[in-house]
């Protein structure tokens, strides 16, 4: 089993140590960070409404570089080994992205960047490689017409294909070992929907030919996806069931941050929203408040989180439970 570096490549013992919460050097394994709004695509499944909202909420405030520096340096001291960057839109469009990645790398953590692949020119790829970045690229079709329909874009498909080739030429995708796991620093994630569910094997074969780790999952019924769900995503219960089976057959499960020992952020870390507010999920809102990096230390945030949502090593999701 090959895992994505900085995402699921932790040991059971490391999770158990974090759950004990009795050693400030081992309070977390990963930090989630959210970059500024903005996107060059209009994907039909986007939970952030193509870079305009965060989990359905209006964006009123942004983290500045001092906030990022505080979060990263304090998380490293608390044991975090990776920092996962997901944008309200396209992550690499954030003007601060290089400084943020350099901060992560300088603190001895692996940056893991979610991207749509359009900005992976040769110079950017060299920068990412130099800073030991893991790339998680969203690719929902390998046929240009399907790609454009899902992404709501024109003319970007060749740039994504070129970006993938740039990554491979620079050496991304090699298999190494970390924490006793075989890991890679390059993966593709596909959102399974009605528009592409008959082409998933084709996408997976594309990844296999290029030695890229393939994962897939289901969209959340939020943002743009909520509006186009019936037309483009799942027009019937049969479609939804078929999509679920495809995701389970082709990947490690339905959630990007789900590991063998539970949710990475809820159990062994924390996520900071675009405004610095502590969260458990990029796409869903937690009802309980446990701090903001602008006013609280990371240690305070972790302790409040553990008090509000008692960690457990299974696939239970407290946010989905709150929604019932």
Image (cartoon, rainbow, N blue to C red):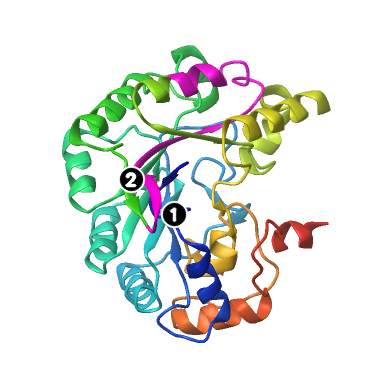
Residue at the spot 42% in from the left edge and 56% down from the top edge: 84
| Residue 121 place in picture, x, y as percent | 22, 33
189 or 293, which is in the foreground? 189
- Residue range corresponding to the magenta coloring: 179-205
Where is mark 1, residue-wise? Answer: 9
Left or right relative to 15: residue 157: left
- Answer above or below: position of 232 versus 183: above
- Answer above or below: position of 289 versus 194: below
Mark 1 near mark 2, Cβ–Cβ under 8 Å?
A: no
Q: Please rate how many residues cluster around mark 2, counting C-alpha atoms within 10 Å: few if below 14, some from 14 to 19, many from 20.
A: many
Q: In this rendering, which labeled residue sits more in front, label 1 or label 2? A: 1
Quarter of the image that includes the C terminus: bottom right
90 or 191, which is in the foreground? 191
Residue at the spot 75% in from the left edge and 30% down from the top edge: 240
Q: Is residue 137 magenta?
A: no
Residue at the spot 57% in from the left edge and 75% down from the top edge: 19
Question: Which of disc 2 and disc 1 is earlier in sequence?
Answer: 1
| Residue 268 place in picture, x, y as percent | 53, 68
Q: Is residue 181 visible?
A: yes
| Residue 48 place in picture, x, y as percent | 56, 46
232 or 127, which is in the foreground? 127
Left or right relative to 108: residue 31: right
Q: Is residue 199 magenta?
A: yes
Where is mark 2, residue-wise? Answer: 92
| Residue 128 place in picture, x, y as percent | 24, 47
- The answer to which image quadrant residue 110 occupies is bottom left
**How far, Cα to Cα, is label 1 from label 2?**
24 Å
Residue at the spot 39% in from the left edge and 74% down from the top edge: 79
- The answer to which image quadrant residue 305 occupies is bottom right
**What mark, if any, has residue 106 been given in the picture?**
none
């Amino acid at each position: 089993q090959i895992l994505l570096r900085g995402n699921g490549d932790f040991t059971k013992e490391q999770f158990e140590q974090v759950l004990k919460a009795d050693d400030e050097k081992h309070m977390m394994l990963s930090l989630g960070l959210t970059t500024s709004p903005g996107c060059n695509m209009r994907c039909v499944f986007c939970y952030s409404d193509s870079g305009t909202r965060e989990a359905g909420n209006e964006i009123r405030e942004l983290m500045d570089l001092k906030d990022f520096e505080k979060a990263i340096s304090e998380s490293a001291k608390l044991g975090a080994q990776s920092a996962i960057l997901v944008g309200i839109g396209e992550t690499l469009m954030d003007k601060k992205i290089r400084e943020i990645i350099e901060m992560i790398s300088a603190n001895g953590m692996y940056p893991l960047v979610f991207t749509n692949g359009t900005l992976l020119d040769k110079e950017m790829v060299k920068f990412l490689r130099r800073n030991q970045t893991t790339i998680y690229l969203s690719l929902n079709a390998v046929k240009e017409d399907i790609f454009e329909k899902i992404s709501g874009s024109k003319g970007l498909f060749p740039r994504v294909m070129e970006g993938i080739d740039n990554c491979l030429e620079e050496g991304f995708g090699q298999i190494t070992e970390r924490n006793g796991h075989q890991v890679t620093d390059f993966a593709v994630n596909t959102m399974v929907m009605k528009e592409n569910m008959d082409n998933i094997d084709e996408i997976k074969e594309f990844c296999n030919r290029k030695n890229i780790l393939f994962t897939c999952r289901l969209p959340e019924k939020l943002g743009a996806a909520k509006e186009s769900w019936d037309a483009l995503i799942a027009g019937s219960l049969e479609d939804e069931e078929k999509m679920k089976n495809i995701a389970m057959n082709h990947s490690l499960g339905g959630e990007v941050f789900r590991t063998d020992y539970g949710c990475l952020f809820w159990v062994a870390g924390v996520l900071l929203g675009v405004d610095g507010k502590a969260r458990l999920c990029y796409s869903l809102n937690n009802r309980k408040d446990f701090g903001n990096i602008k006013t609280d230390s990371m240690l305070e945030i972790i302790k409040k989180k553990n008090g509000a949502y008692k960690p457990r090593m299974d696939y239970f999701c407290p946010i989905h439970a709150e929604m019932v």
